[in-house]
Amino acid sequence: MPNELPKMTTMKNAAAHVLEEKESGFLSQRVIDLRSDTVTRPTPAMRKAMAEAEVGDDVYGEDPTVNRLEAAAARIFGREAALFVPTGTMGNQIAIKVHTHPGQEIICEERAHILDWEMGMPAWFSGCVLRTLSGEDGILSWREIQKKIPEQSYARARTGLIELENTHNMAGGTVTPVEVMEEICDGAHDRGIPVHLDGARVFNAAVALGRPVVEITRKVDSVMFCLSKGLGAPVGSMLAGSRTFIDHARSVRKALGGGMRQAGILAAAGLIAIEEMPKRLHEDHANAKILAKALAEIPGLKIEPERVKTNIVIFDVSGVGLGSGELLRRLREHNLIGSAVNEFVVRLLTHMDVSRADCLQAASIIRKVCKR
C-alpha cells in the first residue's frame, strides 16, 4: 500500500491539471487533426456505396464501378480517358514516365511535390533530372520557363516535360490563374514539349477561381487529381488525358504494382467524391481564412491572411521563440495536430472533418501555447 502513494499522488496531480485546463478552456475535448486533408474519413454515403459496389477484375478491365469512375473523371475533365491509381504520387510518376525519355529534363517549381515528396522517382524510375525555378507564390510563368529550355546542343539535356502544380501545396495552397497556365501550355506546345499538371487539389483551385475544372485544365496534356484529399474518399487518385496516353499509362501502372483487382469497392467512394464533394469545398476555404485571421492576431506569429486562397494555412513561428517541432509537440499535448514545413514554418489544413468551431478552438490553443 505505501508503494501506491506516489502513484496516487501523481494521478491526483494529473487530474487536477486536466481540470484546471478544462476550466480555462485550453484543453480540447477531441483531437483536432489539421495535418492534412488526407486524414478525412469516408462519409456514410461512401461507406454504403463501398459495401454495395459491383466489382470485377480491374486488371482485366472488368470492374464496372472502376469503369464508371474512369468514365466520369474523363467527362468532368473533358478528356478521352482516365485511369484510377492508388496514389497521387503514382499518378504523377506514371505521367512522367509516359511523357519523357531517360536523360531528359523536367522543369518544375523549386517546391514542387514531385521534387520534395516523391522519393526521387523521376530519376529512379524515368531516368530524368529536374530543373527547378522559383515562382512567386509557387506560380511559374512562361517568361521564366522559356529561359530554362536549352537551344539545340549536344552538351545539354533536352526538356522533356513541364510540370505545374495547382493548387501549390508548399506555397500555401496558392492558385495559378487560368491565363498564366494557358500561356505556359501554348509556349510549351510550340516547342513540342508536353505539360503535366499535378492537380492533387485542383478542385480547390476551381472553387477558388469560380470556374469548372475542365476550363482551368483544358490545355494541359495530362492531369492528376486526388480523391483522398479534400474530396474525402479513403483511397485513390485519377490520371486523365488522351486515349493513347491512358493506354500507355495503364501498362506503366502495372509496372509500378498499381494494378488492383476488385477495386470497385474503392472506386465507389471515388464516384461520390468527384460528383458530390466539390460542392462543399468552399466551406474549407472559409474556415481556413477564419483560422488565418485568428492566427494573425497572435503576437509573434507571421502570417498574411489575405494570401490564404484555399484550405492551406502556413505560418512562421520563429517570433514566439519556438521551433516548429517544439510547437507541434506542445500542441499535440492539447489534442491539436499540425505538420512542419521546415524548422520554423507550420502548415495546417482545413477539411470536411473539422468545423469552424474546431478552427477557432485550434487558434485558441495555439495562442495559449505561444503565450506560455
Image (tube, grey):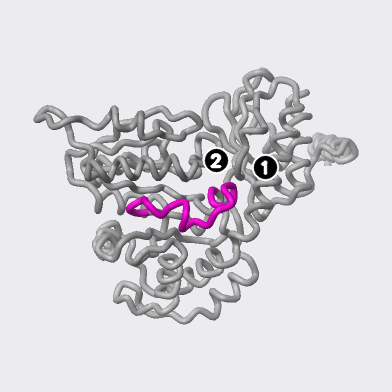
18 or 322: which is nearer to us? Answer: 322
Q: Are marks 1 and 2 in contact (CB under 8 Å)?
A: yes
Reply above or below: 45 against 317: below
Looking at the image, which residue is at 25% across and 35% down?
Answer: 129
Residue 311, position as x, y percentages in the image: 61, 45
Left or right of residue 95: residue 303: right
> Which residue does the numbered mark 1 point to in the structure image?
288
Left or right of residue 300: residue 154: left
Residue 218, position as x, y percentages in the image: 40, 54
Reply above or below: 251 against 281: below
Magenta stretch contains residue 213: yes
Q: In which quadrant will I find the C terminus?
A: top right
Magenta stretch contains residue 354: no
Callout 2, which amino acid? Gly
> Which residue does the numbered mark 2 point to in the structure image?
173
Q: Secondary structure at mark 1?
A: helix
Q: Secondary structure at mark 2?
A: loop
Region in magenta:
205-222
Would residue 2 be visible to someone looking at this image? no
- Label 1 Cα crowd, 10 Å radius (few <14 / some 14-19 / many 20+): many
The CA distance from mark 1 to mark 2 is 11 Å
Looking at the image, which residue is at 48% across and 73% down?
Answer: 265
Looking at the image, which residue is at 45% across and 60% down?
Answer: 236
